[in-house]
Amino acid sequence: MISKILLFVALLTSGLSACTLKAHQPIPAILPDNSSEARIEIVDVVSKALGDKKVPIAQDVFQESSRLLLGPKPLVAPNGTPVYDASSPPALVFELIKQGESCLLRRLDTMQTWSLKTTLCFKR
């Protein structure tokens, strides 16, 4: 009888621990419409991550996707077709993630992560 109780307690404890760990795992997130303050903060973080280089970022950043891709502007042929050069560097990718109650911005090539002041992000 005591061994059954101990087994139950052990299973309950491990189950609760697994739920707690899962609750704090980072998950892809997006921002709600009209989150201009969050966008200003994201532009600032991305700029600093790129050595204070100013990068144009869309008004609706992270509203449709949890990822922001930054790459060189493609060349355009005279007929209007984009031309991609195989030697151009790969796009830099930033991902908006939610971990617990926090919104984080992570650069995927370096895995560098910044905590954002905004808490508006939600699970994608």
Image (cartoon, grey):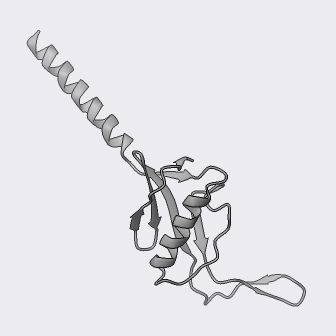
Residue that sits furthest to the left in the current view? 2
Height in image: 64 above or below 51?
Answer: above
Residue that sits furthest to the right in the current view? 79
The x and y percentages for residue 99 are 41, 49
Residue at the (67%, 60%) spot, across then down: 60
Observer-nearest of 121 and 90:
121
Height in image: 75 above or below 12?
Answer: below
Picture quarter with the N terminus? top left
Task: Judge from the rendering whether residue 55 lies leftward or rightward of residue 115; answer left or right.
Answer: right
Residue that sits furthest to the front in the current view? 37
Residue at the (61%, 55%) spot, across then down: 35
The x and y percentages for residue 57 are 63, 71
Residue that sits furthest to the top in the current view? 1
The x and y percentages for residue 89 are 57, 85
Residue at the (60%, 70%) spot, across then down: 69
Residue 109, quarter of the rendered image: bottom left
Observer-nearest of 100 and 75:
100
Task: Judge from the rendering whether residue 85 lies leftward or rightward of residue 82; answer left or right.
Answer: left
Residue at the (18%, 26%) spot, across then down: 10
Height in image: 77 above or below 1?
Answer: below
